[in-house]
Image (cartoon, grey):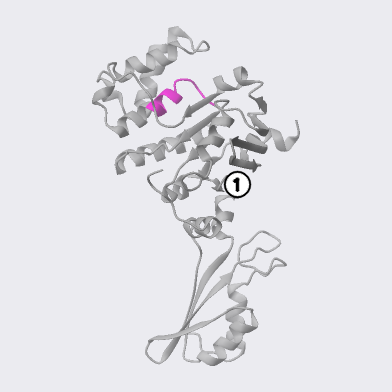
Amino acid sequence: MTAAGRALALETKGLSKRFGHQLAVNSIDLAVPRGSVFGFLGPNGSGKTTTIRMMLGLAAPTAGEVRVLGMDMPRQLDEVLPRVGALVEGPAFYPFLSGAANLHRFDAADRHAAPSTRRARVAEALERVGLSHAARKKVRAYSLGMKQRLGIANALLARRELLVLDEPTNGLDPQGTREVRNLVRSLAADGATVFVSSHLLAEVEQICTHAAIMSAGRLVAQGPLAELRESGTAQLRLVTPDAGAASGVLVRFGLSPVVGHPDGADAVITSSLPIGAGADGTAGLPAANGGVAPEAVVAALVADGVRVRGFTVERGSLEDRFVALTGEGFDVAQ
């Protein structure tokens, strides 16, 4: 295995899945760094859950390869799965048993789990997800959010190197969402890689270090979250009484200024601003990729005698990037 392969917790190459004439996942190359909190994003029907099922050996790919923790799946499934915890497509429990009893049964089904430490591990998992108070309550009396947390507890019964969580905050109230967010951070701090599939962009932006975006079965972007957020364009806003001269400067930079007069005598000029990356990776510096540096624009305005009374650049959000890549917003009911 290459050094790059050892640095990845999860890797796919040309991974595809076809259902009849429908190509649900179309030749994706996914790279999840070890130790990252990786957000897996995409609208309803984009292929996220199908991809996760193939990664975990729950579905056979039509083509392509999957490596999890450096091992081939599904060929080395028996070696991989004890090191992976997963919550996929919602938790399924015996409703007539308590939360603790359900976890005892799941743990007993794991041939790698030591019976002598089962009680302590179940108690610790319930405590980590904030369900100690409901350990003896029957699951049929659990709210959806409590069932979701119990599913995460099941994934934490043993120490895992990789956690795969499909919509982990589904059904949670704000307090529960905050608890899961803190839990994900603590798991990453302990050295685990956490792979989170979610439709909640705000949550992904708060907890993830890296992300990938799916659209219609294709992987359209992936990388560190900061790079994804800053790629593309930003919005420039200039306040000046010298609208004509200012517009001329912006046009020289290849921009398309739009002039308005909401502030009395001063013009407010707006324009999309391509953001480049310099040789050192700093967003916004001039570069061969066609990026425009905001400070270069200001310097040119001042050199041409334009009176600059206000100049701001609003960076695009992850949501802006998502919509630009997929052409659609999130279906929160997915």
Residue 102, given in percent of the width and then of the height, sits at 35, 17
Residue 195, given in percent of the width and then of the height, sits at 52, 37
Q: Is residue 221 left or right of residue 322?
A: right
Q: Is residue 332 above or below residue 71?
A: below
| Magenta part of the chain | 151-160
User: Residue 159 colored magenta?
Assistant: yes
Few, some or many C-alpha atoms within 10 Å of disc 1 (few <14, some 14-19, many ≥20)?
Answer: many
Q: Give the residue drawn at x 59%, y 75%.
A: 295
- Which residue in the structure is indicated by mark 1? 218
**Quadrant of the rendered structure where residue 58 is?**
top right
Q: Give the residue drawn at x 41%, y 29%.
A: 152
Residue 148, given in percent of the width and then of the height, sits at 36, 31
User: Residue 263 colored magenta?
Assistant: no
- Work out whether residue 40 or residue 130 is closer to the camera in this orientation and state it: 40
- Residue type at mark 1? Arg
Q: Is residue 152 left or right of residue 27?
A: left
**Quadrant of the rendered structure where residue 34 is?**
top right
